Amino acid sequence: MTSQMTENKLSVIIRACRLVRRMLRADPEARRSQLMYYSMLEEYFARILRAKEEGGFLVGHTVFFPAEIIYAMGLVPMHTETATWTMALFTGDCSDILASGARLGMAQEICTPHRGLTGAFASGALPHPDVMLWSNMVCDNTAKSGELIMEVCHCPGFLLDRPFKRSQHEIGYLVSELEDMICFLEERSGRKMDWDKLSEIVARMDRQIELVRQINELRKNVPTPFRPQGFLELLTVDYLFPGQPEALEYLETLHQELTEAVREGRGAVKPERFRLMTFFIPPMYLMGFLDRMSRQFGAVSVIEPFFTYWGEGRLEASRPLESVAMKSYMIPEMRMYGPLDERALNAIVQCVDDYKVDGAIYYADVGCRHSCATIKLFKDILAEKGVPTLVVDCDVVDSTVTPEDEVREKLEQFFELLEER
């Protein structure tokens, strides 16, 4: 039975999506793709809310997990970290679930999306999944989260062991892991894998990746046509809707809108003054503020090397499971998985040149040891290219870590520095 707290939390997200869509419909300059995006979000969380009552099988999974398999089996996916981020985005305050996690012994140093997850499941702010799936991608917080969620939710789970390196041997190993996971899901859910459906999803996912690449090509234009924080839409669509028809419809619509904007010479901000590279996730509770600041100073994120800059390769519908494995090596974030090497460093340098980057903003989540370890290295590489970097110590979810006034002061000083160059 769905708890009252769960209904309240998920219903807040659903109502917020509806409110945003009403506001967008009243705005003559709003993009049609934005309406589609918030409609997708609303339905995604509504499915989670309805899953137990409608007899659905709810599958919790961590970030970078191949949700294509969950969709192909007709199960209901719940991306756990995104659920926490979305709570912070639409409520502005996750202190209750963070406090709940703290009462369970979750240390302050642990990444808040994962601390929040523990508290959310323990307090009923999120419905308990029927099974929990997780992997060792891309950090130690993610690798340990699944075990803890299994314990809190009293559900079975499966750890997908994805190798660090890429070779035929490692890809074959990952395929065998995926096969074992499918057997686990079939046994627990009573549903069989629909291999034809998985092939269709893989074909759509290939098109989805190609559309993001084409959108990034359009973002190279001066002025760039995509809104300042628009990359979060691309990230969310990748996380929540891999290979789904609604994702293709959204991306095709967005591509058409940006193509028209480029043809007409319309930029996302007027005038465009600063073209930015963005590292990692901004504080969700400050998204509205960050958008206003960007527009005020004519600043726009034109590329995100670890979110939207896909690696090379194509997916083959005729080999669906191998393609799911191959996709895990094409995901932008995979440049941060395993030993840091030229995959990450060359991508940064290439993006500076291709996107005419003026400055970079590094959102350093204080609970993310994995990403924060790269701050000096990335700053030094960008400095060699003549690109200054602003590091914003922050938290994706916890609004008490970095107040808005502090972020405002840092951004204003950074934009002044860029103006003087």
Image: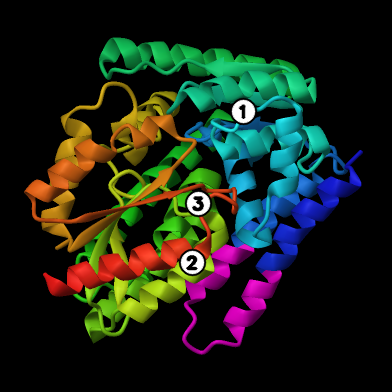
Closer to the chain start, of discs 2 and 1, is 1
Q: Is residue 32 magenta?
A: yes
Three-letter code for the amino acid on which mark 3 is drawn: Thr
Are there few (<14), some (14-19), or many (20+) residues within 10 Å of tag 1?
A: few
Q: Which type of secondary structure does the marked residue at label 1 adopt?
A: loop
Is label 2 in contact with label 3 (beta carbons under 8 Å)? no
Above or below for 378 versus 386: above
Between label 3 and label 1, give the one nearer the viewer. Answer: 1
Q: Is residue 5 magenta?
A: no
Residue nearest the viewer, comparing 421 with 267: 421
Residue 203 in which image quadrant:
top left
Three-letter code for the amino acid on which mark 1 is drawn: Ala
Residue nearest the viewer, comparing 203 with 78: 78
Residue 236: image tag: 3
Q: Which residues are magenta?
A: 18-39
Q: Which type of secondary structure does the marked residue at label 2 adopt?
A: helix
Name the spot of residue 339 as percent of width and height, x first: 27, 21
Residue nearest the viewer, comparing 267 with 311: 267
Residue nearest the viewer, comparing 131 with 72: 131
Three-letter code for the amino acid on which mark 2 is drawn: Asp
**Where does label 1 land, which residue?**
107
Q: Which type of secondary structure does the marked residue at label 3 adopt?
A: helix
Residue 405: image tag: 2
Q: Give the distance between the C-alpha atoms of the residues marked 2 and 3, in whole angstroms.
A: 27 Å
Closer to the chain start, of discs 3 and 1, is 1
